Amino acid sequence: MNAPAKAFDDFFSDIQSALGADAVNRSDETILRYGENTMPGGDRPPAGVVYPGSTADVQAIVRAANTHRVPLYPISTGNNIGLGSRSASSAGQVVIDLGRRMNRILEVDERMGFAVVEPGVSYQAMYDELVRRGDKWMLDVTSGPPQGGMLGNALDKGAGYTPYFDHFGFSCGMEVVLGSGEVLRTGDGSLDRDTLVNWHTSKYSFGPILDGLFTQSNYGIVTRMGVWLLPRPPVVQSFHFAFPDDGDLEEIVELCRPLKLSNFVPTLFRVANDLYLSGSEGESPDYRVSRGKRSLPDDARRALREKVGVGAWNVSGAFYGPSAAAVEPMIQRVRDHFGKSGKARYISHDEAKAIPPLQVSINAFSGIPSLGELGLLKWRPGGGNIWFTPGTPMDGRLANEFQTIGRSIHAEFGMDYMVMNVCGPRFARGLHVMTFNREDKDECARADACYRKLSESFASRGVFVGRAPLDYHAMHMGQTMESFRAACSGIKRALDPNGVIAPGRYGIA
Amino acid sequence: MQTNFSARQLRDPEIAEAAAIIGTCVHYGFCTNTCPTYVLTRDENESPRGRIDLIRAMLERGGAPDARTVRHLDNCLSCLSCMTTCAVKVDYVHLIDRARAHIERHFRRPLADRVLRFLLAKTIPEPKRLLRAMQAARFARPLRGLLPVRLKAMLDMVPDRADAKILAPQVFKAEGMRRKRVALLAGCAQQALSGNINAATIRLLTRHGCEVVVAQGGGCCGSLTLHMGREREAKASARCNVAAWTREIEGEGLDAIVVNASGCGTTVKDYGHLFAQDECASAARRVASLARDVSEVLCELGLPVQVATRAWRVAYHDPCSMQHGQRVTREPRALLAAAGFRIADVPEGHFCCGSAGTYNLLQPQTAETLGRRKAGHVASTDPDIVATGNIGCIMQLRRYLDIPVVHSVELLDWATGGPRPPALEGRILREPAQEKSVPGAPAEGAANDIGIW
């Protein structure tokens, strides 16, 4: 969509008339900063930024965009660091910053255990509100930025670690402004009545389940969403095991699987390697020596493990209960289970509290937003960061094969292998963090090449990514079958006929 | 962020330090989410990373900055919320202080600004002068309508009644066996505004076995003038304290230097940096290494069993200097909970209340917006009492809340045998609940259980 300059001027003029002068920001600084991101492909300055305050405002913006054929790009809180930040799919789109004004917690139902939020509500804000109300309810949080938005994370298929880890799965009922400017309510909200009793309690009443259409897509702008909450347990008691060798991942996965298939352990397992945990504690000790041209050598990796107090692979999980004494027998059973390996070093909850990267896990299992893991972003200087997120079945041998391939590709491009596998019963998502010097052209190009080769290599073995950096959306969509792409395009044409909402996002034009 | 300083500029250690700090900022932008002025305005130049860019341009260019840059830097609260959030830990505090010193040296403010800043810098750090100024302000109230906005705001900030108590240098003996010998920073404005804070601190510390020294020659920590860019005056004040406490350290010795105004504590803990290029660097580092917030020292000592149950609901407000500057958040809560109070955490706790040293005097409109916003969050927790650890926050919150606001030490003193805090005199509190809670660490079988555990 290449709208002429006049179309943008007319669009912004319409928005100022409808929403007020301060609903539009076209200052040079704003355009510069909203275009910034952490990916190798460069910045993408928008045409301007608009700040709606309500669903009606979003409708007005979308309608004006249709009138003037101006491309939009909605963001919630803009904390999608490593996946695109606040920058649009392509330069020249108009960013709709929903987070500035649409940041209200619309409802908290403490009997049914759900909250209803606008896009700008952050994990921290929701946590604060739940604490204010007596701390009876727990929100599943990510281990990412506390100011990250709950709604945006759920729509991008983000996840946490508690039993309510699947943020889209535990959302219920959306309000969406479609590309036409019409408002759609999903789930039981679709009932054409003023009173909607089950909008945020039931997902599966009459008609097709449309909610999924608005995850990782550009078919509409979600302006309201229900989120289910977990009763806060009085005690969260974590357990941790450190394993000494890279190859221990195979055994770890085999040990974790039955504990999740049975749901004996209620949380997901965080299975993090040495660099994922140590990386948040400071800059790579090798970076200034090697100028970032190689992966951290094994001896330096071992030294780092000893310094931080972690293993080559590290398993973390937690139990919930009324008291530490009540959960102790369960922890003992897990200890016995992992003890079978003969290689696992047990780290207790209290010991883990003194190891900052393990405290991050405790916070995550406890539904407490925390900043600790952001330290990964300073592993290398220069502000480059992308996340590669393939998955593996919970099959130890396969997981280890993917580890071997991943390590070798990272080494080939001089990147560091920093991975956490978030393990459920049948599947683990592998969060590969690539921090690189974006101000160094060579390193930037290597990071890009590394990501592309990882993607191709894993895809050739039948593995797709989950969330992806914006730079690679088109590439990943290109990895799908033709009929999938055709279906995505068809839905786009139906719901957003002029293609005004985030054209190109997720590879859907 | 890449910089473009000349080799000659970089030979100046102050510029070299600033350049190094600027170089660490990579524009992730996490800081923007927690910066009060950015959240209020959505103006990039009102965000930490925007200001870092402005500082870079100002220092690279050298000489007099433009008025626009000065305005954006003046608008910074120095709350340091950005430093807590920053993923790469940009040392913003030393950068903004350097920028302010540069502005003070090279920028000629309008006459009214210069006079105002001069008066503030000469009055607030001197408690006796401040008392006289407050007295004069009370007399001037009938003229309020004739005054410009900032002077009006200042007049409004003068409390009707000040509980002043200015301490002379002296030693307060420990009750029972002496466990520690500590110096107390008696402070400046706090003595004129709320003398009971020092009195309660001394009672608490002596009750817990501390000998408390108010050292001869000590005074203002230098924080207020430092954050106004008046580095020379700040150093002069700080140097007096370093000398005074060094005499005590080398005399009978000190186990700690206790500070009960967290804004001051942040500065004293940073004396090593302030005097890094100075001949008293070593003494300053030693002093800084002994500096503790009063809550840190009391936690080390441990509270005795309280003499009375004080299970009122206390909203604890984290001063920015305490949470972002010193990272002391656990101790005050632990102490208040140990004394039987029920603690309520305040939503949006990372946000500044708008006090920020002289900020609410120099930037009254933003300060009021933030003050009202904070007051709303505090009130939403339905507290009986509000406690905090910094006199600036206390004065600011009192303006916007109809709930008694006290220093944590006043509650701790009261709970362990001291008098009722003056701010609670004549206030009827609700009958306290019986159960107690510790935020972040619910008791087993906790009161917050919805009935399933």
Image (spheres, rainbow, N blue to C red):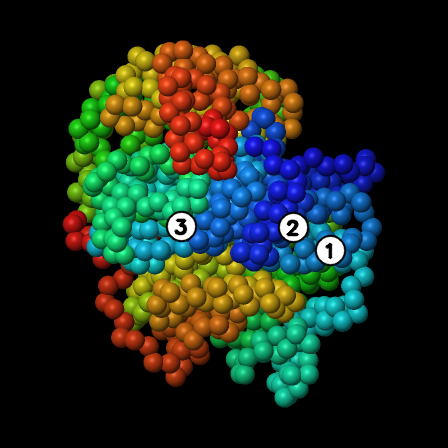
Q: Position of residue B298 (x, y in %)?
A: 42, 60
Q: Which mark is residue B249?
A: none
How busy is the neighbourhood of tag 3: few (under 14 within 10 Å), some, or many (20 plus)? many
Marks 2/3 same chain: no
Q: Position of residue B6 (x, y in %)?
A: 81, 37
> Pointer 1 and pointer 2: residues touching (CB < 8 Å)?
yes
**Label 2 sits on what residue type?**
Asn
Of residues B99 and A122, the one drawn nearer to the viewer in this rendering: A122
Q: CA separation, marks 1 and 2?
A: 10 Å
Q: State the residue position of label 2.
A: B45
Q: In this view, does B147 lie to the left or right of A358?
A: right
Chain holding disc 3: A
Compared with A192, B9 (above or below) is above
**Label 1 sits on what residue type?**
Arg
SS category of the residue bearing label 2 = helix
Label count reads 3
Q: State the residue position of label 1.
A: B68
At horizontal 46% and vertical 19% (from top left) the residue drawn is A478
Chain holding disc 2: B
Judge whether residue B397 can be spotted in this image. yes
Q: Where is residue B228 in the image (x, y as percent from the top left)?
A: 69, 61
SS category of the residue bearing label 1 = helix
Q: CA separation, marks 3 and 1?
A: 35 Å
Of residues A10 and A436, the one drawn nearer to the viewer in this rendering: A10
Select label 3 or label 1 by which is in front.
3
At horizontal 69% and vertical 70% (from top left) the residue drawn is B120
Q: State the residue position of label 3.
A: A118
Compared with A441, B44 (above or below) is below
**Label 3 sits on what residue type?**
Glu
> Pointer 2 and pointer 3: residues touching (CB < 8 Å)?
no
